[in-house]
Image (cartoon, rainbow, N blue to C red):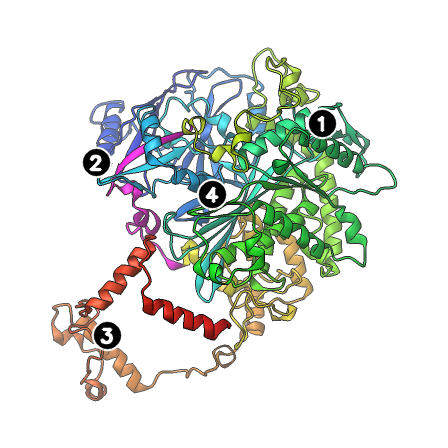
Amino acid sequence: RYFLVGSNPAETKYRVLKIDRTEPKDLVIIDDKHVYTQQEVRELLGRLDLGNRTKIGQKGSSGLSRAVSAFGIVGFVRFLEGYYIVLITKRRKMADIGGHAIYKIEDTNMIYIPNDSVRVTHPDEARYLRIFQNVDLSSNFYFSYSYDLSHSLQYNLTVLRMPLEILKTETTQTRQESFDIFEDEGLPTQGGSGVFGIGSKPYEKYVWNGKLLEAVRNTVHRDWLLYIIHGFCGQSKLLIYGRPIYVTLIARRSSKFAGTRFLKRGANSQGDVANEVETEQILYDASVMSFSAGSYSSYVQVRGSVPLYWSQDISTMMPKPPITLDQADPFAHVAALHFDQMLQRFGSPIIILNLVKEREKRKHERILSDELVAAVTYLNQFLPPEHAIIYIPWDMAKYTKSKLCNVLDRLNVIAESVVKKTGFFVNRPDSYCSILRPDEKWNELGGYVVSTGRLQTGVLRTNCVDCLDRTNTAQFMVGKCALAYQLYSLGLIDKPNLQFDTDAVRLFEELYEDHGDTLSLQYGGSQLVHRVKTYRKIAPWTQHSKDIMQTLSRYYSNAFSDADRQDSINLFLGVFKPSEGKPHLWELPTDFYLHHKNTLSLSQTRQSYTYWWTTGVLKHLPLPFDEVTCAENRRKLTVKKFHKYEEEIDIHNEFFRPYELSSFDETFCLAMTNSTRDFMPKNVGIDPSPFTVRKPDETGKSVLGNKNNREETVLQRKTAASAPPPPSEEAVSSSSEDDSGTDKEDEGAVSQRSTPVKVTDAGDNTKITENVVQSTKDVYGVNLSDVPSEDDLAIYARFVQLGQSQHKQDKGSQQLCSKQHLDKVINLIPISSFSQDNIYEVQPPRADRKSIEIFHAHIQAGRGNMQPLGKDDFLMYREYIRNRYL
């Protein structure tokens, strides 16, 4: 048998799974659903160890040996022999949302469960295992123990605010106790010591190990089930005069109709499209952590292939294979299914930004535009006009070639109109200052305003042909526009506008480029070819040669390695299940029948040509059906009751982990990319605001994308989205434009998304440092003397001695300094307001009543209970407004 022992982070609660190894082909797992303490687990394992020894009393041959230590179970998989278990053996923290850590899988381990004595061998098993392992779980797969990554922040926080009374009646008795997505956040009950947590089912479309967990989903406790997403996750810190604002980018790749560039185009018969990715940008003030008291904002947009039956024939070996429409679809059946899914998840309006070419000598991309216009026009006939799908065609390639037009200015106009229509999510009401002096743009903002803040209704869906380069730039511009509104809603800027060449936008642009590179590698086989700088026309001339290399890399990947990658994705996602007597995966001429279910069996229920949406969706628009309180959605939720002082909901212990020894160097929030350290100019007298426009030569990093002399940062950011720049290379921050740097960046690009490796040579490092390090006079404006004076050293020695003398030790053994030095500083006068003051003992000063009242009011404000403003406060605020603005 295998025994899986799982614990909470503090190692105070344990669960045990027993896996039977005597069954050659079946999976037998026993979960006793009991929570053990540390002592009980030790006793249990001790008894098992004793009972399984070959001879009683023989210590040499232990009955129980540790096979592997892991951070979670990805799932269980079976090919033609017995089951394997896939375990996460290495992880790296990538982001933090309200105290909930998001981890990237760094390494996994597959263990064959049945014992060798019962193993039935099959000749093709090894080949299937190799194909399965071709999906590199260490590249861009993410998980979180306590936050639901498959849903948006808006959904998660809306669920948290659902009226408790409705939920308690329906869900408390229905299921066994369960884990919840916000176990750190409680919902206080009236007058009791109990706290309720709410858990929701994950959104299956974005979960990549759903099929791997299917075998155990109903037999084990929910705490064992760890859902992983595939895509991108990056986080950077924007410091606004020292106030930490975390900018997070999470991209979820759909697991339905997933695959590689030329092999997965258009949509399948269920309305799932190829290369569908939901990108969410989350902004929050990291100085307050909890979801209930903090300020959180998010904006979601989507990319995905054109929802039609279309494909490209790659057998011709052309760089641009001709586009063919595979099936006639006069009633837009596939598009209807696709947009129905979107209305359920996002609400209305759905805005399509179509970036494909409109004018071509030979009709190529325009085929898709014409069909998409016809489909949208047909579907809009039956929707109410206020909820109609909005279609925006814009030939981005044509505008790029034009010398008269600035592409990004035009995109900015589109972005403004889109964000005004959809709005964005923020979990706090508009601030008083924006009511007093409202901005014109703010009043025109769409979305749905509720008492607790704003909700995003509807979504922007961007597509070109590949949904890679053009789409990423368009999404960046929309994200930049939304970021300005998000910052304004949190009261951090006075107008919802952001300029290019500010530290904030550079930080955001770098996040988006990493996001684009990652998604492009997953679908197209190379990094982005055209970047934001290409469209701004400020890319250096060296960028063109890199673009050519990326194009060649993409072409090679599409021609030679995509078919193997597609096979492994089909096997990993359970689209193909190996079985005896049926053709093997590598014998299939095409995977068309695996992805299009209607080719194997006719559906019993025909969808209406006119009422093409799911029942109930239209009634709640513009709100998304998934977020509405109704019986169907309540069935997806579970409620669990906690005691007020229970460990699971103690957010402080969960986040700060006082029981662990941690060092500042390894603390995630200090090591992450930081606007002040990585983007702000290093000169004195520069305005520290991240919203000040900088000149290209004024930045911490060069604006022309020359990230070359920070090789480790390049590797880490490219591999893991926004990993920390190493402290040792802090001095080497301004960029050098030499050839060696360019070579090194190319070296960095080779090991994309693998574990970061340090490639700088120690010798080179010291050389560069000598050239770049500035004197203390240049940096701080003062000269620090080399050695402290004798008097200063004597005072310091006296301070050390005072500290040591608090231990009741022999005074004679503590003569650290010579008497002649101590004579001058022996009479130290306490200057603090503490009556008894040393480094081991402190007596707090007495606070007067008014100070205590102010402090209590401050605490209540943090909980959301504002004190009524007095007459004096109003007069003072009015005077301030008059002096400042009138």
Mark 4 / mark 2, whichever is N-terminal: 2
Picture coordinates of residue 197, whole percent (x, y): 33, 37
Picture coordinates of residue 366, whole percent (x, y): 80, 37
Identity, as a three-letter code, of the amino acid under mark 3: Val
How far apart are the two marked residues, 1 and 3, measured between alpha carbons?
78 Å
SS for callout 3: helix
How far apart are the two marked residues, 4 and 2, measured between alpha carbons?
38 Å
SS for callout 4: helix
Identity, as a three-letter code, of the amino acid under mark 2: Gln
Kindly identify which residue carries mark 3. 800
Q: Can the viewer see residue 715? A: no
Cβ atoms at labels 4 and 1 below 8 Å apart? no
Kindly identify which residue carries mark 1. 309
Kindly identify which residue carries mark 4. 153
Residue in front for this viewpoint, 872 or 203: 872
Identity, as a three-letter code, of the amino acid under mark 1: Tyr
Q: Badge 1: few (under 14), some or many (20 or more) residues near its Cα, within 10 Å?
A: many
Mark 1 / mark 2, whichever is N-terminal: 2
Q: Which residues are magenta?
A: 636-664
Q: Is residue 378 above or below residue 251?
A: above
Q: Badge 3: few (under 14), some or many (20 or more) residues near its Cα, within 10 Å?
A: few
Kindly identify which residue carries mark 2. 39
Image-based side of 812 in relation to 275, left or right: left
Verify whether residue 661 appears in magenta.
yes
Picture coordinates of residue 15, whole percent (x, y): 30, 31
Cβ atoms at labels 3 and 2 below 8 Å apart? no
Mark 4 / mark 1, whichever is N-terminal: 4
How far apart are the two marked residues, 1 and 2, measured between alpha carbons?
60 Å
- Between label 4 and label 3, give the one nearer the viewer: 4
Mark 3 / mark 2, whichever is N-terminal: 2
How far apart are the two marked residues, 4 and 3, measured between alpha carbons?
51 Å
